């Protein structure tokens, strides 16, 4: 039996116990965990189910991938071990360096395929947010295991497939495989921090069910301005301004006097068309009835636009207004002290708004207070 079998078995039995508890929690919640709004508690339960309940079938398929490779090479399976969260199979013989590489690779390709299939399902045919999150967690678990954790375990000396996949004797095959492996990691990392990651956050977050309902409402009534703005706001909230523009502009075409629509459109245009964004945001902020949250986020976007345009003084004013409305927002605090440094300005108003943010637990605001101290020192030393 493999050297680390006892340790792995102990961990597996612990996971079996947690899996049993997860099943009990799912039974108690009934259909609510997957068929109702995705609450923070529901998110934790669905995430646990994705690991403790979906991993054993994935392990079975992983080992079956090894078996199929052995059978294709004319071998037989003479031993096996399966304990829900880990396992192994024993072929009747070695198939040489390249044959063993093929056998080792087969199981991991199955694991990668499971993760990729779960992601494709989420992006191509998304369902409720809870089911999307369940599938996304399965994808994250399987892909991170096959591409990160399992190779790392083999790298530090634990026995496993990647010791057969990456070795000098099979360099003509192993080297291209390593290049593909590393490229996949880079692409997944970039996707996570880019548009695909933002889309996944929308599909697996609490806003998605509202978006689905709003889209159904717009399909019934294309002039439903409230639903159009809900769709636009949800995309803005996760960092998808380009996707937010269409529904917001459709709402504005029907209600050009609506300040909320101008505020959202200005935020959506802040990076792509800053001049137009400034017009839209200023128009929205001129309306005293603008929702406080939209007003704060509009001040935030306008502060970015003005700071990027070299108007540090105007940026500071809007950044302070944003931080008053969003005292815990780190980006608002960062803009306050960046604009203050760029403008070379300090003052009781700026100090007060940063102090308020610090008391609300905004760690970035502390850096802002340090920035104000630097400005004050420079001003004291100036001739």
Image (cartoon, rainbow, N blue to C red):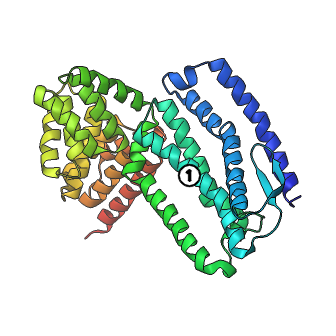
Q: Which residue is mark 1?
A: 113
Residue 88 on image: x %, y %: 78, 54
Residue at the image point whose x is 34% and y is 34% from the top: 234
Residue 149 visible, this angle: no
Residue 200 falls in which quadrant of the image?
top left
> Tag 1: Cα neighbours inside 10 Å, few (<14), some, or many (≥20)?
some
At which x and y percent is residue 232? 27, 34
Q: Hey, which quadrant is residue 174 in on the image?
A: bottom right
Measuring from the top left, give residue 24's x and y in whole percent.
72, 24
- The residue positioned 61% from the left and 50% from the top of the image is 142
Q: Which residue is rendered at x = 18% and y = 26% of the image?
A: 288
Q: Is residue 78 shown to the viewer in this render?
A: yes
Q: Quadrant of the C terminus?
A: bottom left
- In the picture, measured across the screen, residue 329 lies left or right of residue 245, that is right
> Considering only vertical position in the picture, is 371 above or below 318?
below
Asked if residue 256 is positioned above or below residue 156 in the image, the reply reads: above
Q: Which residue is nearer to you in this view: 240 or 177?
A: 177
């Amino acid at each position: 039996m493999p050297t680390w079998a006892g340790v792995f078995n102990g961990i597996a039995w612990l996971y079996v116990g947690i899996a049993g508890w997860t099943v009990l929690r799912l039974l108690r919640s009934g259909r609510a965990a997957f068929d109702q709004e995705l609450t923070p508690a529901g998110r934790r339960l669905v995430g646990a189910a994705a690991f403790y309940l979906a991993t054993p079938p994935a392990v079975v398929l992983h080992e079956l991938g090894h078996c199929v490779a052995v059978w294709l090479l004319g071998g037989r399976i003479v031993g096996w071990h399966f304990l829900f969260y880990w396992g192994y199979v024993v072929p009747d013989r070695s198939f040489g360096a390249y044959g063993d590489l093929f056998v080792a690779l087969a199981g991991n390709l199955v694991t990668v395929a499971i993760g990729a299939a779960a992601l494709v399902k989420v992006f191509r045919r998304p369902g409720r947010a809870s089911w999307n999150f369940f599938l996304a967690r399965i994808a994250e678990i399987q892909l991170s295991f096959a591409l990160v954790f399992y190779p790392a375990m083999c790298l530090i000396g634990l026995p496993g497939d990647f010791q057969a996949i990456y070795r000098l004797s099979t360099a003509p095959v192993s080297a291209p495989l390593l290049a593909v492996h590393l490229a996949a990691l880079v692409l997944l990392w970039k996707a996570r921090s880019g548009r695909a990651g933002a889309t996944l956050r929308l599909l697996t977050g609490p806003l998605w069910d509202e978006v689905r309902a709003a889209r159904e409402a717009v399909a019934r009534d294309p002039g439903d301005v409230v639903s159009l703005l809900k769709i636009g706001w949800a995309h803005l909230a996760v960092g998808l301004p380009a996707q937010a523009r269409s529904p917001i502009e459709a709402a504005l075409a029907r209600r050009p006097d609506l300040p909320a629509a101008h505020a959202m459109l200005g935020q959506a245009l802040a990076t792509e068309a800053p001049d137009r964004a400034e017009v839209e945001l200023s128009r929205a902020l001129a309306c005293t009835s603008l929702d406080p949250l939209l007003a704060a986020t509009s001040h935030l976007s306008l502060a970015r636009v003005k700071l990027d345009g070299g108007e540090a003084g105007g940026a500071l004013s809007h950044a302070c207004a944003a931080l008053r409305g969003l005292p815990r927002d780190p980006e608002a605090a960062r803009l306050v002290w960046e604009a203050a440094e760029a403008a070379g300005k300090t003052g009781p108003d700026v100090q007060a708004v940063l102090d308020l943010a610090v008391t609300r637990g905004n760690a970035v605001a502390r850096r802002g207070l340090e920035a104000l101290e630097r400005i004050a020192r420079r001003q004291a030393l100036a001739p």
